[in-house]
Amino acid sequence: MNRPTPLEARAELARRNLHDFARFVHRPMTFAPFHESYYRILEDFALGKIRRLIVTLPPQHGKSLGASVLLPAWLLGINPDHRIAVASYGFSLAAKFNRQIQRVMDSRNYRFAFPASRLKQGGEKGYARTAEEFEVVGRNGGLIATGREGPLTGNPVDVMILDDLYKDLLEANSPIVRDNAWDWYASVVRTRLHNTSRELIVFTRWNDDDLIGRIGRKERIVALHSPDQIGEVPADHWFHLNFEAIKESVPSLLDPRPEGEPLWPERHSLRLLEEKRELDRVMFSCMYQGVPLTRDQLLYGDAFQTYTALPEEVIRKGNYTDTADTGDDFLCSVCYDVSCEGMVYVTDVVYTQETMEHTEETVAAMLNRQRTRVAMVESNNGGRGFARQVQRMARVTKVEWFHQGANKESRILTNAPTVLRHVMMPADWRGRWPDFAAHLCGYRRTFRLNRWHDAVDVLTGIVEVEVLNTRGNKGVRKVAFSK
């Protein structure tokens, strides 16, 4: 038995899976770890294991190359009878995908791997090959490219790929454009599909009322975190795979990155991404994190007041600390000065997921550095022991602990206007405390949609004490530890 040549071995792997196919026909191919998960899920879609799939990826992370170029080419290789449609916001972009697919299928390696999936050559007659459509010679398959609101032929579509139906922010924020896109999807796209048709939507999100948002309000969308979920969800449900530019969600089998790690650091470093986030946090959340927001959905947004100099007269130097409730919560400790006008000037912050053994020393050092007179520690989760340890190390601070019994959601939402009226941040606060700033500025009004409440809870507690003269439940026990 003759051993296969290296080219034959690679061609066999290309026929078996999309990841190896990409490396075989698109050289040089640069992959990040997340691309393996991305191509694995696209492969499951191609094989019919997933019928309805939504993938959201940040800009310039290989979204379209995988979904709108390599996937259709591989589909027509493993089944030359597939009828595929690719649509985008305009015909010119869809036609570009079409031309790229044709170049892949014309390549030497593709023809070696899939000799039965051949396109019309030269003056060969009887088969279409244009920027709008092409057909596989001798088979029933082919591809149609169209723009949003453009026509689809009367023939049924086996695989529908929708890649970025909105050109830019201006289009995405236009109710008319969004309505037209939805009407076209419902009246044209859906009417071309049959019982076993598959739909793939790959977007950089701009708005919560985009096509994905509207589908989610009418049909079931399931977040995809593990390949094990495939086969356990009804076929009429959608799977949604979201890759955040900066990891904020819980690590999963498909995206095991630890919190704070960039998706493709070789191309988009954490520093570059943080700079983009500082330019516009709402847009960064939409486009790079896959979490569409509008400014009226944010509790604070970018509305915090800032200062460049502390007031000359300070009537109180305080601190408010909330220890972490669970393993991935943040300890949040904020030092502040109170002016005679009742304004609260934030002067220093400890915001970390480190253990209490570490944070006790860090918070005590901050209290000493700021010469804080009184520090209040919520005792709900080990706060009393934390307060005792901090008191031993803080030289001039009286450390108090108390129980916070009031409803967190009610406190935060009710006191948000007071926070914005009375809390002042240093002019460079976003650079000094990036996680603290991100969790405050990105906090949503819908309480259950937020993962972390620690920073917001502490600012709420500060204004309750310093502005509203309340502290949790009335009459709760308070202990002050003296030297």
Image (cartoon, rainbow, N blue to C red):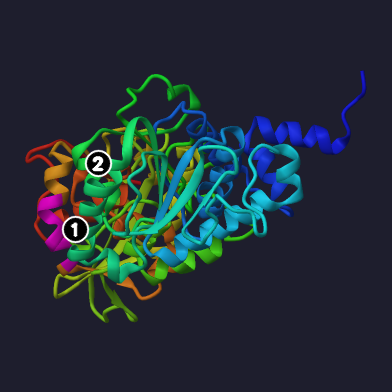
Q: Quadrant of residue 327?
A: top left
Q: Secondary structure at mark 2?
A: helix
Image position of 5 with respect to 266: above or below: above
* Residue located farthest toward the left when viewing the structure as drawn: 474
Q: What is the x, y in percent for residue 318? A: 27, 59
25 lies left or right of 234: right
Question: Residue at 10% of width from left, 50% of height from top?
Answer: 470
Cα separation between marks 2 and 1:
15 Å
Q: Which residue is mark 1?
A: 179
Disc 2: which residue: 216
* Residue 260: x %, y % from top left: 50, 50
Mark 2 burial class by Cα count in 10 Å: few <14, some 14-19, many 20+ = some
Q: Amino acid at mark 2?
A: Gly
Viewer-side residue, 313 vs 408? 408
Seen in the image, is 420 located left or right of residue 159? Answer: left
Q: Position of residue 425 (x, y in %)?
A: 31, 70
Residue 49 in sight from this viewpoint: yes
